[in-house]
Image: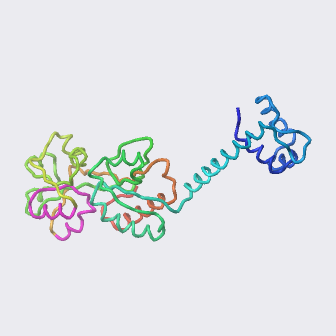
Amino acid sequence: MIELKHLKTLTVLRTTGSLTATANNLCLTQSALSHQLKDLEQRLGNPLFLRKTRPVCFTAEGKVLLALADNVLPTIQAAEQELVSCRHQTAGRLQIAIECHSCFQWLMPALKQYQVLWPDVDIDFSSGFSFEPIPALAKGELDLVITSDIQPRHEIHYEPLFDFEMCLIVAPQSALAFKSHIVAADLADQTLLSYPIQRNRLDIVKHFLQPAGIDPLAWKQADNSLMLIQMVSAGMGVAALPNWAVDNFVHQGLIVSKPLGKGLWRRLFAGVRASEQKHHYLEAFFATAKQQCQQHLQGIKTV
């Protein structure tokens, strides 16, 4: 019944004091303005102001609508300004969860470069191992999740960063070090080392062992990539890690890297809320992360 245009018209009329000036201010013809006001007065059943008075004199009904306009219009204007700010903001928060500790190898240099250009973005980290990060992202508890294990949801946007190959790393003295590639059955008598997350979320389990119906002989966990690599080098088990995360250690002769089957390739994503994906500081993060990865990681494929 009462529309925003009515409230805006009455506030302009109060300011200008005349219908002619109000029509000019609102870029309306006088007939269009008169029609708008008469239509509203007919709906309300009473006039809103007295004609032929200068300055304009509002009736009790007109004053009620003006009071409403004074409450509503500033709130709407503030919301509109905030929405514009969201599109162009240079400040923000990045509460990040990382589902792969190996990602710190490229993420920290990328963030260092990013913060030079975006110093007003507050960055912090949450472990992606102790809880489900994607639901937390949807709830607003996180702002960005680095993951290869996407869970399609309409409110989440997954920005592709790069493709990488999951490899099995073994000790140089292991019999597996002399195979051209690894098949699932090769792990039936092995101790599989992994990060402390649910086994069904591990790439090697979901995409390599499970389809073949194979379980490793035993499991052990380590908190970070360096510890996993050291344990493998000591002959305490085998582990599946991204090719770029183990390249330096392979060249040092500490471990041997073997392809899983014909090659187990995965894609790494940066997950954010779909409503925020166009925020400038997030788009800048995507660009910086991709640039850093392309320049410094070996064996990845750009997307």
**Chief secondary structure of the magenta span?**
helix
Q: Quadrant of residue 171?
A: bottom left
Residue depicted at x 21% and y 53%: 196
From this view, report whether residue 194 is shown above or below residue 44. Answer: below
Q: Is residue 21 left or right of residue 62?
A: right
Inspect the magenta stretch and tell me whether residue 39 lies in it.
no
Q: Is residue 228 magenta?
A: yes
Question: 290 left or right of 232?
Answer: right
Q: Where is residue 215, by image quadrant?
A: top left
In this view, the residue in front, 235 or 222, is 222
Locate the N terminus by quadrant.
top right
Direction front: furthest residue? 60
* Span shown in magenta: 225-252
Between 142 and 100, the one lying in front of the other is 142
Q: Quadrant of the C terminus?
A: bottom left
Percent coordinates x, y for residue 252 in the rendering: 18, 71
Going by the picture, which residue comes out furthest to the right?
A: 52
Residue 106: x %, y % from top left: 33, 65
> Which residue is at the front of the view, 302 or 2?
2
Residue found at x 26% / y 52%: 129
Determine the residue positioned at 44% across, 48% down.
157
Residue 124, position as x, y percentages in the image: 37, 61
Looking at the image, residue 11 sits to the left or right of residue 173; the answer is right
On screen, residue 54 versus residue 26, left or right, reads right
Q: Which residue is found at the position 82% from the left and 44% from the top?
A: 28
